[in-house]
Image (tube, grey):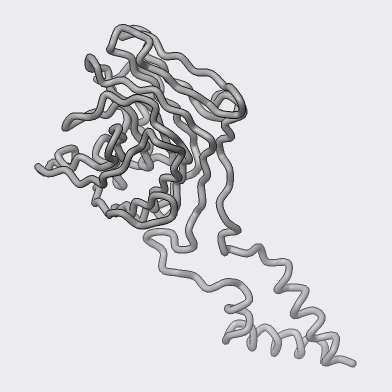
Amino acid sequence: MKINKIYMIFWAICLSIPSIVQAGPTIIFDGTDLPENQGWIKYLNYSNGTAHTSVEDGIFTMDTTVGDGHSTAIYMKYVGKEYYFRYSVRLRIIESGGHNLNDASFCLGPYGFDSMFLTKPMPYHGGPPRGGMLYFDEYAVGNTMAMNYQSFDISYTIDTTDNFHLYTLEVKSDYVDVFIDNNSVFTYYSPETIITDGFLFFGDQCNEFGLDSQVEIDYITYERLETPWPVKPIPAPSSILLGGSGIGLLVLIRKKLT
């Protein structure tokens, strides 16, 4: 009878410990409503033009081509300062003016913002970490490594305008694995992890003439991966308790009961 009671207490403790294994991706933006109604911070640089956002048939549209050619439009959301995670966006490019060595007509950013960006206008007082961005042209996506103080561009050819595609940035500290429709396409390096502050962002990051875009977004998900940096991988609670710690716990409980 005592043995049964021991095991009942043991499993009650196991079940009471929160799991540290990621449950799966979480939807952090649904295209059926505007981002600002879902916890995203809106930054629209009206001083350099206009940006239009709308929702129609359950799809969010961001359009910076309607201004004077200098529009910028950024949305950002705080998800917590992590170093291993997946940032996925299902989107379609309708129109993109392309990119240059420092800027993009449309981009996804996994590495957050200089905190000064929240209170002072871009581009002179903080802003998106450019080296970590994934840019979107009409027939390619990529990362301009010149943003990382290097001199080459890594990209993947794809018609971004033909249909919706799921673009995933799998961040592993200072490396980003890029997936399109769950297929790995390339990896780029970014030292931006040293300044990440827990924000994700997307949008038209450039105020230069002609680098504007029109984009439709279906949804965005975020998933924290199991292995945070720089902490070493931690086994799930069940593994811990069934190992040496679990044996010690059983011994302790049994002593208490006897």
Name the residue: 46% across, 41% down.
Answer: 89
Is residue 46 positioned above or below 1 on the image? above
Residue drawn at x 34%, y 18% as measured from the top left: 72
Q: Residue furthest right?
A: 1
Tell me: residue 100, above or below residue 155.
Answer: above
Of residues 185 and 16, which is closer to you in this image?
Answer: 185
Q: Position of residue 50 (x, y in %)?
A: 39, 9
Q: Is 137 on the left-hand or right-hand side of 234?
A: left
Q: Residue at horizontal 53%, vertical 73%?
A: 235
Where's the N terminus, which quadrant? Answer: bottom right
Give the quarter of the image for residue 182: bottom left
Q: Nearer the viewer, residue 76 or 54?
A: 54
Query: Which of the two residues, 135 or 230, is positioned nearer the viewer here?
Result: 135
The quarter of the rendered structure image containing the C terminus is bottom right
In this view, 200 is above or below 168:
above
Q: Residue furthest left?
A: 151
